[in-house]
């Protein structure tokens, strides 16, 4: 029964339908981190840039390129003890809260608008 409980913890993101838009990725990333889902994504540019990043030099999820890597990482995810799972989930949440906070959004917006409107940068 333990294995069935572990498998039920693995959820997929509704945004994994192949939508190429970055806002969809950001929304999906926020949803998965808030939902404490451990991420396993394809090892390509988009997931490396937006989905599985690093915090304090440690990954926020898993990246795989082929079937063997997917299988190995899925096994690793299902084998995580509760402390390791929680640590990984907290790291992923920190990555999201740092990148997608209101403060980060405001700073990025102002830095891009400043040259257009001749605003002083903060």
Image (cartoon, grey):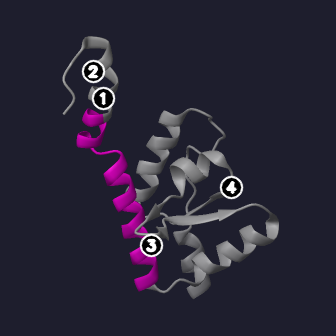
Q: Are marks 2 and 1 in contact (CB under 8 Å)?
A: yes
**Dot placed on the residue nearer the N-terminal end, 3 or 4:** 4
Q: Quadrant of the C terminus?
A: top left
Left or right of 75? Residue 66 is right
Which residue does the image show at 40% across and 69% down from the upper left?
56
Question: Which residue position is annotated with label 2?
Answer: 114
Q: Are marks 4 and 1 in contact (CB under 8 Å)?
A: no
Q: Residue furthest top?
A: 117
Q: Does the magenta stretch mainly form a helix, a strand or a loop?
A: helix
* Distance (Cα) linking label 2 and label 3: 37 Å
Image depth: mark 2 or mark 3 in front: 2
Question: Which residue position is annotated with label 1?
Answer: 111
* Distance (Cα) linking label 3 and label 1: 32 Å
Question: Which residue position is annotated with label 4?
Answer: 42
**Dot placed on the residue nearer the N-terminal end, 2 or 3:** 3
Which residue does the image show at 44% across and 42% down from the upper left?
27
Q: Are marks 2 and 4 in contact (CB under 8 Å)?
A: no
Span of residues in magenta? 83-107
Query: Considering the numbered disc 3 on the image, is that residue within a helix, a strand or a loop?
Result: helix
Q: Position of residue 9 (x, y in %)?
A: 52, 70
Which residue does the image show at 50% across and 58% down from the upper left?
53
């Amino acid at each position: 029964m333990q294995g069935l409980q572990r498998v039920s913890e693995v959820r997929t993101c509704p945004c994994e339908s192949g939508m190429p838009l970055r806002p969809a990725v950001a929304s999906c990333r926020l949803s998965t981190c808030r939902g404490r889902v451990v991420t396993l994504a394809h090892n390509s540019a988009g997931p490396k840039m937006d989905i599985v990043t690093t915090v304090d030099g440690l990954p926020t999820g898993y990246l795989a390129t082929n079937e063997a890597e997917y299988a190995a990482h899925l096994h690793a995810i299902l084998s995580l003890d509760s402390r390791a799972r929680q640590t990984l989930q907290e790291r992923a949440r920190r990555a999201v809260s740092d990148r997608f906070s209101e403060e980060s959004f405001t700073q990025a917006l102002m830095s891009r608008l400043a040259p257009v409107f001749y605003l002083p940068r903060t």
